[in-house]
Image (cartoon, coloured by chain):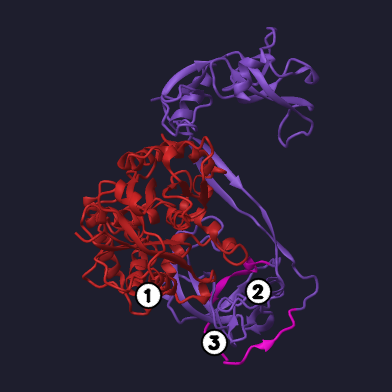
Chain colours: A purple, B red
């Protein structure tokens, strides 16, 4: 088989998320260097606070202020920090029970090495220099030599000026995409300006582009069949809104094109004809630009239109 | 309580799990196992009453990848079908409930995952609480390491004991031709202390498929069906800091509801991707040394994400099919630090 194709693929999605009243107070509090917890009906103080009691599912909202100091309940030494993590030098992941809280918060602990970290050690919040109302307003924790005062956490109204009501959660994941056997063959053929599909051994239909399986019969396809280059417009639409990062003048026509010999229509842009003259049955051929690995668009061949009966099964 | 309908696993197949499968698309990886389970039962794609799958688009970074996988099941004319964005074990649970209703007598269940295109440690951070956890990018190994340290602090295990679990698992896997890590494997350096590379599962691609059948249909399709005597799944709070990471009450409750404690099992296939998680599960499931735990090598030998839980059910069922087990427990997990757990109890007819 030909060399397997691979290409980098970056998926980025900045989700905008709204906050409930408790999360809003907590994250705004971090911006103001105040750590808030929430009290459950059972008298426990949850930090980080949640909107609903994790045991009873009851809506909760009685806020208290806990200390920025606490105790490590478990830890793990991360000698190779990864992208996006709180510190770019080796650090310990820690669960920290802040003084006054009954539950633990996950964050990073900046410590010289694993030998200096232990469960039960005392730590305090190191605030980020610039704070926006996010969990990253805590830059990390750092070792602290004071003991807990044992004071009950004080009731807090949760009121702040200019409360944060949402966060933008940035996410980026990097992949190396490989299209698999059938599509690799298809793409290799395209680079030689040939369109190659695969025939189903059971129903004998030719699929273009091939995906390695017949979607009707559920069996593997492998017999390669060259189709086209000419084909028939089976249906089309007129695009009136410019797509981001796409340098094509609107309006233009995007069509389903059944290449001669194919039993599945592929899609492509129709050019070389005014958009309002494109029609079902129009005969087209691919237009290649130098160096391109796929047709830039399809244009009319000048042949008479195909009879509807010849392509109605491909709609 | 016995289920209202007798439903069994009648066939199971899995791929050889490998670090990469660049030359195959997801459906190309999946097709052979679908055909293996169909061939084993003599069923054709169109004979199946209900189809259910488990996978995640995030793994390979392909939106709606599960719809592409449907090319492999012959979804025309339209079939009765469903998908869960979870391990295939939960797809099996859905298929089991569908068969319980009497709407279908057979079901095809599959799960697949290609971890090789991306970085699975980072991908899995996207399943975490988006407000308090995901912005910190705590990766799957880091979270498992926090759980392992909690176990060590509690005196429930230590690093040599964890290494022993790793060695035993991979030794067992030497008899499993599908496993990715087999035989002696260097326990390695700390990845995130206290976990070493040997405490962590291999990263790889793979797929698995199961056929379920009800009542007499199951007896017709399989010489010794693996009857699902009970199956249940339970979830814990998402906040790691509110959980006792050294215990798994969700596993214990699911096992109770599945009837696991009514009689001893002879075999247990546990979905414990990290050595330390086996410690938690053995305790929650009250497994003593009389039970053969992970004869397949478990997830430490092959961990195709989104299929590894279904593989546990399939491995347990296969042992019943061939008479190596009479009563087996299968477990699947999802989420960080064993957040959500499924337990199934399988039995063969008396011989």
Q: Is residue A138 left or right of residue A184?
A: right
Residue at the disc numbered 2: A51
The x and y percentages for residue A180 are 45, 33
Q: In terms of depth relative to the viewer, which is nearer, A105 or A228?
A: A228
Toward the top, the furthest residue is A303
Marking on residue B38: none
Q: In terms of depth relative to the viewer, which is nearer, A126 or A43?
A: A43
Give SS at disc 1. helix
Q: Quarter of the image for the N terminus of chain A: give it.
A: top left
Marking on residue B151: 1
Q: Which residues are magenta?
A: A134-158
Residue A70 to residue B32: above or below: below
Q: Are marks 1 and 2 in contact (CB under 8 Å)?
A: no
Q: Subunit of mark 3?
A: A
Q: Quarter of the image for the C terminus of chain A: give it.
A: top right
Residue at the disc numbered 3: A146
């Amino acid at each position: 088989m030909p060399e397997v194709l691979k290409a980098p693929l970056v998926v980025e999605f900045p989700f905008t998320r709204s906050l409930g009243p408790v999360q809003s107070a907590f994250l705004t509090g971090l911006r103001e260097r105040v750590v808030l917890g929430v009290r459950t009906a059972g008298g426990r103080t949850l930090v980080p606070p949640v909107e609903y009691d994790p045991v009873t599912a009851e809506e909760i909202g009685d806020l208290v202020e806990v200390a920025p100091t606490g105790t490590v309940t478990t830890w793990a030494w991360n000698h190779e920090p990864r992208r996006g993590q709180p510190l770019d030098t080796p650090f310990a992941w820690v669960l920290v029970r802040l003084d006054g809280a009954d539950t633990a918060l996950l964050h990073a602990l900046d410590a010289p090495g694993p030998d200096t970290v232990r469960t039960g050690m005392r730590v305090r919040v190191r605030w980020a220099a610039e704070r926006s109302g996010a969990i990253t307003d805590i830059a990390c924790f750092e070792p602290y030599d004071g003991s807990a005062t044992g004071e009950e956490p004080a009731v807090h109204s949760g009121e702040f000026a200019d409360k944060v009501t949402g966060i933008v959660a940035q996410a980026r994941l990097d992949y190396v995409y490989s299209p698999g056997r059938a599509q690799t063959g298809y793409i290799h053929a395209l680079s030689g300006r040939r369109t190659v599909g695969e025939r189903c051994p059971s129903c004998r239909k030719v699929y273009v582009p091939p995906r390695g399986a017949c979607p009707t019969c559920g069996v593997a396809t492998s017999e390669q069949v060259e189709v086209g280059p000419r084909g028939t417009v089976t249906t089309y639409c007129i695009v009136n809104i410019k797509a981001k990062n796409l340098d094509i003048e609107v309006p233009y026509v995007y069509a389903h094109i059944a290449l001669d010999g194919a039993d599945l229509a592929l899609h492509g842009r129709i050019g070389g004809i005014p958009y309002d003259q494109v029609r079902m049955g129009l005969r087209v051929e691919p237009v290649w630009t130098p160096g391109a690995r796929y047709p830039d668009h399809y244009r009319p061949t000048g042949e008479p239109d195909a009879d509807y009966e010849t392509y109605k099964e491909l709609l | 309580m016995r289920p209202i309908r007798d439903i069994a696993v009648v066939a199971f197949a899995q791929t050889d799990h490998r670090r990469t499968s660049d030359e195959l698309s997801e459906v190309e990886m999946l097709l052979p196992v679908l055909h293996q389970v169909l061939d084993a039962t003599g069923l054709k794609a169109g004979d199946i009453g209900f189809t259910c799958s488990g996978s995640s688009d995030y793994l390979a970074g392909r939106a709606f990848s599960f719809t592409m996988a449907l090319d492999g099941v012959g979804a025309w004319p339209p079939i009765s079908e469903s998908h869960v964005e979870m391990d295939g074990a939960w797809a099996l649970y859905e298929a089991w409930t569908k068969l319980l209703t009497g709407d279908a007598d057979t079901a095809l269940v599959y799960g697949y995952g290609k971890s090789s295109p991306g970085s699975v440690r980072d991908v899995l951070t996207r399943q975490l609480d988006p407000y308090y956890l995901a912005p910190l990018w705590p990766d799957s190994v880091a979270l498992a390491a926090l759980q392992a340290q909690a176990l060590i602090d509690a005196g429930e295990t230590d690093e040599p004991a964890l290494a022993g679990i790793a060695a035993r698992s991979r030794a067992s896997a030497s008899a499993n031709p599908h496993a990715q890590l087999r035989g002696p494997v260097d326990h390695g350096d700390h990845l995130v202390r206290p976990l070493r590379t040997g405490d962590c599962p291999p990263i790889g691609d793979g797929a698995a498929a199961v056929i379920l059948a009800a009542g007499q249909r199951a007896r017709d399709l399989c010489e010794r069906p693996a009857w699902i005597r009970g199956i249940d799944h339970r979830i814990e709070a998402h906040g790691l800091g509110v959980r006792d990471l050294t215990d798994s009450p969700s596993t214990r409750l699911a096992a109770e509801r599945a009837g696991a404690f009514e009689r001893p099992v002879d075999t247990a296939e546990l979905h414990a991707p990290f050595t330390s998680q086996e410690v938690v599960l053995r305790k929650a499931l009250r497994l003593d040394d009389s039970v053969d735990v992970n004869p397949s090598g478990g997830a430490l030998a092959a961990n195709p994400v989104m299929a590894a839980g279904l593989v546990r059910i399939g491995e347990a069922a296969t042992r019943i099919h061939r008479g190596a087990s009479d009563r087996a427990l299968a477990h699947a997990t999802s989420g960080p630090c064993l957040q959500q757990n499924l337990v199934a109890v399988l039995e063969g007819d008396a011989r």
